Image: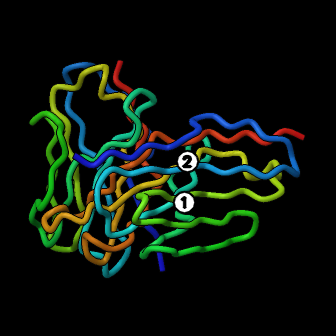
Amino acid sequence: KAGVTQTPRYLIKTRGQQVTLSCSPISGHRSVSWYQQTPGQGLQFLFEYFSETQRNKGNFPGRFSGRQFSNSRSEMNVSTLELGDSALYLCASSFEGKLEQYFGPGTRLTVT
Amino acid sequence: ELKVEQNPLFLSMQEGKNYTIYCNYSTTSDRLYWYRQDPGKSLESLFVLLSNGAVKQEGRLMASLDTKARLSTLHITAAVHDLSATYFCAVDYAGGTSYGKLTFGQGTILTVHP
C-alpha cells in the first residue's frame, strides 16, 4: 500500500506571496491532519479534515487555511507569507481522525 | 490545555549503554505514540500505547505507559549508533471533539557515540 505523499517536497517563496501544499493520504484513509514543525515551536497541529469538512483547528492565524476533496486529498494554503512561516509542513492520514496517524515526507517551505 | 513534556531534551550516550527518555502529559489521553525523526526526514512511528501498563518492545527500544501517573518511558538498551535521531512522544487527547490532533513533546535529540 502506498504511503502518504506530499508535493512539492521543497519550496522557496518570497514574503507576501501565497503557497499551496498538497497531501494525498493512504488509500482508504479519510482523515488528513496538517502539522507545522519549526526549531523554535516544535510540532504544532494546524487542522484536520474528514470527508471534506474541517473538524478541528489549531491556534494559527487565518492566513493558514485548508480544504479536502472528495477523494480525501487535501491542500493547505498560506497567504501573505511571513519569514516565520518557514518550516517543515507535515501531513498525516488516518482511517478515522482518532486512530493512528501515518506521516508523509513533508514539504520544506523557505520564505525569503 | 494538554501539555506534553519530555526529558531529557538532549541525550548523549555511549554505545552499549542503557538510558530512558521520559514523557509526561497533563490530561487524560486515549493513546500515546512514540515517533522517531532523522534529520530532514519525516516521522516514523515506533510504538502506539493504548492502555495502562502497556509495554511494547522492538529491538533495543522498549516503551511503557502508566496512565495513572500520566507517564510514558522509552528505554534504550545497549545503544548503537543507528539509534541516533530525535524521538518524540505524542498524545491523542481524550476530549470528544478533538479529532486528528496529536500534541507532541519537545523531542529528545539522541546522539550515540562510539
Residues marked 1 and 2 touching at CB (< 8 Å):
yes
In the figure, residue B109 lies in which quadrant?
top right
Q: Amino acid at mark 1?
A: Glu
Q: Amino acid at mark 2?
A: Lys
Q: Is A47 left, or right, of B108 in this rendering?
A: left
Q: Residue at x 39, y 48 (%)?
A: B104
In the figure, residue B108 lies in which quadrant?
top right
Q: Which residue is mark 1?
A: B44
Q: Looking at the picture, does residue A100 appear above or below residue A15?
A: below
Do marks 1 and 2 share a chain? yes
Q: Which residue is mark 2?
A: B41
Q: Residue at x 16, y 26 (%)?
A: A80
Q: Residue at x 31, y 81 (%)?
A: A28
Considering depth in this image, is B74 or A78 the residue closer to the camera? Answer: B74
Q: Is A101 left, or right, of B93 in this rendering?
A: right
Considering depth in this image, is B64 or A25 the residue closer to the camera? Answer: B64
- Dot 2: within a 10 Å radius of its alpha carbon, few (fewer than 14), some, or many (20 or more) residues? few
What secondary structure is found at the residue carrying circle 1?
strand
What x and y, as percent, mark residue A26?
Answer: 38, 73
Q: Is B14 left, or right, of B50 in this rendering?
A: right
